[in-house]
Image: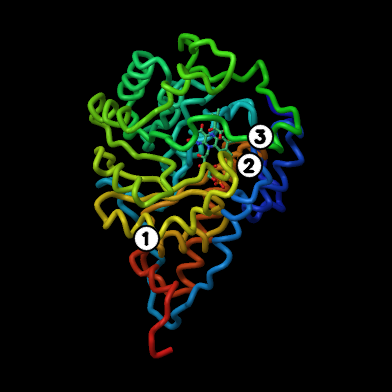
Amino acid sequence: MTDATHQGVIPADAVSLADYQRLASKRLSAQNLAYLNGGAGSERTLRANTEAWGEASLWPRVLRKFDHADTRTTILNRRLASPLLIGPTAYHKLFHPEGEIATATAASALRTPYIVSTQASTSVEDIANQADGTPLWFQLYIQHDKDFTKQLIRRVEQAGYEAIVLTVDAPVHGIRNAEQRSGFRLSDAVEAVNLRDLPAPPQSASAFDPALLAAIPSWQDVAWLRELTTLPIFIKGILHPADAVEAIDHGADGLIVSNHGGRTLDQLPATRSALPHIVAAVEKKVPVLVDGGIRCGSDVLQALALGADAVLLGRPILHGLTTAGAAGVAHVLKLLQHELEVAMLLTGCRDLSEAPAILSHSSHF
Ligand SMILES: Cc1cc2nc3c(=O)[nH]c(=O)nc-3n(C[C@H](O)[C@H](O)[C@H](O)COP(=O)(O)O)c2cc1C
Ligand SMILES: CC(C)CC(=O)C(=O)O
């Protein structure tokens, strides 16, 4: 459970995503905060994610005629008013008593697609009931028991989820020193309820027992999943261009460039650095999404300028949830949407197709 009262009131000094991070850190225990904000090792990749977006300059065009900044994007024929998605994060009840229900309420209020984690602390059906027709995608960690995984897919299909996001970058838990130092352990009151009936994994003395290693997902499992469902499949956790090509060859309908928010292996590239290589390798065959360190509207605009079709938000959603429940999540999304529109107006981008120009200037310059 959370460590503070949650009034659902937006604090007057919450005017940016950084404010929500600050406010959330006042409300959580040291353990839950380390789980939320922490990264792998000494957190070089975690820092690089945010810093890399800040390194580029945006080259503005002025005096353009605008009627509005058009933030619409299309992903697999689904028209979205904005390129913002709620990324998958586990255990929302650690951060607010209403957990994923509060997140789904905010998603629904703003019609923002929400990618629900396998490790959600609320059932996929209850989340779908709350989402009220807002696009829900299901993030899948393939489980060691394939029949169980199949039943989970059937449940989300039945509940109306529109896509599967297969996370492939965390076959083992990263070594998160901040989390270890804090002594984080999952509270007994918070559970991955959608995995409740999962049979116990093979017993082993070591995490690297061959039986466990054999259960780690591979390209064969991607092929298995492709056969299992007709829902679109996004592969999350692609950093290498060769894997991007292989994913498309295996039937992926979309890719998510991600280093898991710097939570797996320290020294992975910042996603801002990986994104252009993936975009080049994909040759517009499938949509490319990106996450990691996106904290303001100009970060979003820059990701779109580099060829992403949309971005996912991880920690900022949980900062909003911790601070003010559904209202906090909705406010985080609104702030970012407003910042994106201001960044577009101030760089002369009338719609997102004009974004690439902000990263280059003419040879006459
Ligand atoms: C507390 C927390 C839990 C997460 N849980 C999941 C998860 O269950 N599945 C998953 O694919 N990614 C998970 N992630 C990774 C996010 O989906 C995302 O890749 C990352 O947080 C993006 O970076 P950002 O937090 O800088 O926006 C988690 C991240 C955090 C911070
Ligand atoms: C329960 C974890 C596997 C969720 C996760 O992906 C994370 O904490 O980064």
Q: Quadrant of the N terminus?
A: top right
Residue drawn at point x = 39 percent, y = 68 percent? 355
Which residue type does callout 2 highlight? Gly
For label 2, the SS is loop
Which residue is at the front of the view, 185 or 190? 185
Q: Position of residue 91 (x, y in %)?
A: 57, 27
Q: Position of residue 260 (x, y in %)?
A: 52, 41
Neighbours of disc 1 within 10 Å: few (<14), some (14-19), many (20+): many
Q: CA distance from mark 2 to mark 1?
A: 26 Å
Which residue type does callout 1 highlight? Gly
**Cβ at disc 3 under 8 Å from ligand 1:** yes
Circle 1 is placed at which residue position?
Answer: 307
Circle 2 is placed at which residue position?
Answer: 39
Please state if 85 lies on the left or on the right of 244 as rendered.
right
Circle 3 is placed at which residue position?
Answer: 35
Q: Quadrant of the C terminus?
A: bottom left
Neighbours of disc 3 within 10 Å: few (<14), some (14-19), many (20+): many
For label 1, the SS is loop
Where ligand 2 lies, by quadrant? Answer: top right
Q: Quadrant of residue 161?
A: top left
Q: Are marks 2 and 3 in contact (CB under 8 Å)?
A: no
Judge whether 296 appears above or below 219 on screen. Answer: below
Which residue is at the front of the view, 33 or 200? 200
For label 3, the SS is helix
